[in-house]
Image (tube, rainbow, N blue to C red):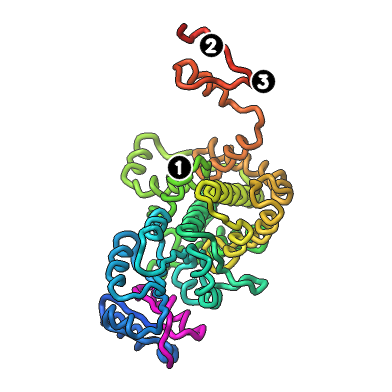
Amino acid sequence: MTKPQVGLVGLGTMGAALALNIAEKGFPIAVWNRTASVTQDFHAGAGELAARIVPTETLEGLVAAMASPRAIILMVPAGKAVDDMMALLAAHLQPEDLVIDAGNANFHDTNRRAAAGLPFRFMGIGVSGGEDGARHGPAIMAGGSPEDWARMAEVFRAIAAKAEDGTPCADHMGPDGAGHFVKAVHNGIEYADMQMIAETYGVMRDGLGMSAAEIAPVFARWNEGVLRSYLVEISAAVAGAADPVAGGPLLDMIVDAAGQKGTGRWTAIEALNLGAPIPVIEAAVMARNVSSRRGERAAGEALYGPAPSRAEISLQDLEQALIAGKILCYAQGFAMMTAAAAEFGWGLDMPAIARVWRAGCIIRSAMLNDMAEALGQDPTRNLMLAPFFAELLQQKTPSLRRVVAAGALNGLGLPALSAGLAWFDLMRTARGTANMIQGQRDFFGLHGFQRLDGQDHPHGPWAKE
């Protein structure tokens, strides 16, 4: 075997799966893990792919085992671990060697590293799809220079998931941290999508009194239509699964406390910095944080009593509400990326992003084909204003309104669906209420109100002479 030009550091779950994927696609790869036994066990268990994998016991050995110019993929925890590993590699690499951070990095860290004058080349890529995606085909969102993308494109496109039309779900997003930024927005949308599905599950369980076994075929049926997606598909599977220990529905045995990693929170924070409203994603992050406060929730129920919960709502309305919520969530995510492109000078290709998300990643959805087409017609237009989605929203939002109203009247918490509807109503209202806010600010001397006729405003009766 010729010396590999691709190497990988970090043989955890994701790193091991990605290394096997690269080897399976015909690229020899050198690997190293800080714990030598992990490397040895990985190579021993690689089967016929072991012939394309070069295990190494030291970082120096990894570099020596590779042909120049090298490309070393880091699959280590985001943050300090990446900086530490890059510092160790700096003593062994040449200027044309390339280090690729493929973890869930904060894009600000990627920007910082790209501007740090490193003694080697550097790029950051977002990889989505979990362990199965890493092994059999993830979605890849690459940041960095066009030259470095061109150098790695063959590998990334080979290992990426393929959409139904055969297109690899891997593309260059833009310079520096653009790839990690797009991945963070992807994860924010993932949070929101999961939350809205959970909310419809909650309405079926608490509002309609349905069992998990009755809910499973509803999700399965929804997955045959507009809502066809990975998350709806696995929601049907989860609802229909039996607990191997107790024998009842597995879903009823899972603690209703959902943690969160950094990317959803980063997306919400960055949206505030950009002045880009993403209330559905923010509501999803909030809901996860509330879910972890189980003691306070129990105390709240003991104090105020359980919500009345039972609701008069149809399954058809629930399905239509979820369709509307999904469109609104994606519209907010793409609008945020449009704002980031303007703020950071990135040439983010919105149709290409939608196409990359069509397979391999967690939010893959049949709807993304239509989104790619709509964004191709006008990449800066908000998706809720695109004719195709405007027609869908006109059809579906009455159902969303009925579901949100039923939730409010019956004590069913629907934060993400409610946030989507509120944003929709604000976005479709030419005459809003911010004139009162501006008037309040002017009263306290914080801001001058703007006249509709464009003229300078006279001092109000409250203004000091």
The residue beneath circle 2 is 459
Give the number of the disc on residue 314.
none
The picture quadrant where one finds residue 435 is top right
Front-lying residue, 434 or 421: 434
Tell me if I can see residue 268 in this picture: yes
User: Which contiguous range is marked in magenta?
Assistant: 1-29
Give the number of the disc on residue 273.
1
Q: Nearer the viewer, mark 2 or mark 1?
A: 2
In the rendered structure, which amino acid carries the disc numbered 3? Asp
Front-lying residue, 173 or 78: 173
Q: How far apart, in angstroms, are the residues tagged by discs 2 and 1?
A: 32 Å
**SS at mark 3?**
loop
Q: How far apart, in angstroms, are the residues tagged by discs 3 and 2?
A: 16 Å
Classed neighbour count for the residue bearing mark 2: other residues with Cα under 10 Å, few (<14), some (14–19), many (≥20): few
Picture coordinates of residue 401 (x, y %)?
A: 63, 40
**SS at mark 1?**
helix
In the visual, does 392 lie left or right of 230?
Answer: right
Q: How far apart, in angstroms, are the residues tagged by discs 3 and 1?
A: 31 Å
Name which residue lies at 29% across and 83% down. 61
Name which residue lies at 63% across and 72% down. 167
In the rendered structure, which amino acid carries the disc numbered 2? His
In the visual, does 289 lie left or right of 200?
Answer: left
Classed neighbour count for the residue bearing mark 1: other residues with Cα under 10 Å, few (<14), some (14–19), many (≥20): few
The residue beneath circle 3 is 453
Tell me if I can see residue 47 in this picture: no
In the visual, does 116 lie left or right of 424?
Answer: left
Picture coordinates of residue 341 (x, y %)?
A: 54, 50
Name which residue lies at 34% across and 75% down. 93
Picture coordinates of residue 268 (x, y %)?
A: 45, 46
